[in-house]
Image (cartoon, rainbow, N blue to C red):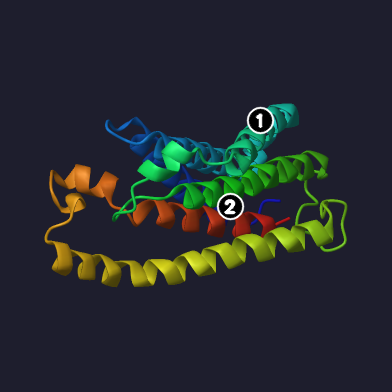
Amino acid sequence: MHGSSVVDWLLTGLMGMTGLYCLVRLLRPGTARGERQLDASEALKGLGMAAMALPYGLSRGVPVAVWAVLFGGAAAWSLAEGLRPASRDGAARAPEGAGSTGHAGHRGHHLYHAVGHLAMVYMAVVAASTVPGMAGMAGGAGSAGAPLLTGGLLLFFGGYALVSGVQLIGAPAAGAAAGVAGGPVGGARGSVARRLLGAPELPQACRMVLGMGMFAMLLTM
């Protein structure tokens, strides 16, 4: 499931930086529980994708059982969070301002991550069953995986990345309108690092980047 070494290194670097950014967001103080959960899920996915995309088959040193347990467990947790009904008190107190995500939004993101974690397990199983030196050859033994499942995942992550990109294009205009109507927003105060970590658009940008990375990795199967 590996392409050229240049593409693999680019994927490793981009996914690794995205995962590290999400990890730093996870550790920042004053973050709501729901946001921490999403940051943790995105950090795990980004760093796992970076490790899986390492060129020259370096990720083969990790037993497939490790990938299955790690991301299978993460998928089960994300699915449980995505299907968990909102409590009445929590729904009543859910913030709806700039940079916040309501319970419905959190559920949707968790379900998206559940699919992503399961896709990681799928790619790990495919990589483990691939004959060394045959990956990427059309019709060869290295072209493992279920074509229909791979195609469905490609449509899912490609569509998600596209929709997220369209939403991000409209985010600056909405943020500017909110600033004019209500004065300076909370994300505009503080140090540069605090503004960077607290920018409301960046979590969605991270999900878009991770979706693009999943799309690229699935293409090489």
How far apart in space, not on screen, are marks 1 and 2 (Cα)? 30 Å
- Please say if 113 is above or below 183: above
Q: Estimate how packed mark 1 is, as few (under 14), some (14 to 19) or many (20 or more) residues with alpha carbons within 10 Å.
A: some
Whether residue 60 sits left or right of residue 51 in the image: it is: right
From the top left corner, tell me how far across and down residue 211 is, in percent. Answer: 55, 56
Q: Name the residue tied to disc 2.
A: 5
Q: Residue 179 versus residue 87: which sits nearer the camera?
A: 87
Badge 2: residue crowd in 10 Å (few <14, some 14–19, many ≥20): some
Q: Nearer the viewer, residue 26 or 150?
A: 26
Vertical position of residue 98 compared to residue 73: above or below: below
Measuring from the top left, give residue 62's x and y in whole percent.
67, 29
Residue that badge 1 annotates: 73
Q: Is 143 on the left or on the right of 30, as rendered?
A: right
**What x and y, as percent, mark residue 206?**
43, 52
Q: Is residue 148 visible?
A: yes
Q: Name the amino acid type tagged 1.
A: Gly
Verify CB contact (< 8 Å) between mark 1 and mark 2: no
Left or right relative to 38: residue 145: right
